[in-house]
Amino acid sequence: ISPHFDAGFLTILSQDNGCHSLQVLTHSDSNNNTDESEDRWVTVQPLPGALTINTGDMAMIWSNGIFRAPLHRVLTHPTTRRYSAPFFY
């Protein structure tokens, strides 16, 4: 799935522990006193029995930017099937 923001308030996701394909874009910190100022994609490692929660555009708007909607994507794997159960609120 191409990089996108979720439009709703929250997305609750039960991830497949056998396939780590959800990635979020991290934002560089201009105050970290290093030469690394690039954003990068980080794979979300699912924890057994845990849920992954994404805030969406609606949460960002209602909170005046306190809660940010993360830019994320889902990668495919040529031989591994991915199962997830999202709930959009």
Image (tube, rainbow, N blue to C red):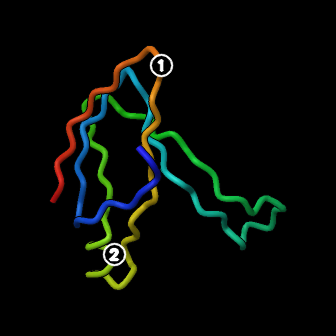
Residue drawn at (46%, 59%), measured in percent from left and top?
A: 71
Q: Residue at the bottom extreme?
A: 64
Q: Quadrant of residue 26?
A: bottom right
Callout 1 secondary element: loop
Q: Is residue 81 left or right of residue 79?
A: left
Q: Position of residue 11 (x, y in %)?
A: 24, 54
Q: Position of residue 18 (x, y in %)?
A: 37, 20
Q: Position of residue 57 (x, y in %)?
A: 32, 70
**Image quarter (top left, top right, bottom left or bottom right) of the N terminus:** top left
Establish if 80 lies above or below 42.
above
Res. 50 mark: none
Q: Is residue 83 left or right of residue 38?
A: left
Residue drawn at (54%, 54%), measured in percent from left and top?
A: 25
Amino acid carrying mark 1 in the image = Pro
Q: Nearer the viewer, residue 85 or 63?
A: 85
Q: Is residue 22 left or right of residue 36?
A: left
Q: Quadrant of residue 36?
A: bottom right
Q: Residue at the top extreme?
A: 79
Q: CA distance from mark 2 to mark 1?
A: 35 Å
Classify mark 2: residues with Cα within 10 Å, few (<14), some (14-19) or many (20+).
some
Res. 78 mark: 1
Q: Are marks 2 and 1 in contact (CB under 8 Å)?
A: no
Q: Position of residue 59 (x, y in %)?
A: 28, 72
Numbered disc in front, either 2 or 1? 1
**Nearer-N-terminus badge (2/1):** 2
**Image quarter (top left, top right, bottom left or bottom right) of the C terminus:** bottom left
Classify mark 1: residues with Cα within 10 Å, few (<14), some (14-19) or many (20+).
few
Tell me the residue that label 2 is attached to.
Answer: 60
Q: Is residue 83 left or right of residue 33?
A: left
Amino acid carrying mark 2 in the image = Met
Q: Residue at the right extreme?
A: 35
Residue drawn at (55%, 45%), measured in percent from left and top?
A: 42
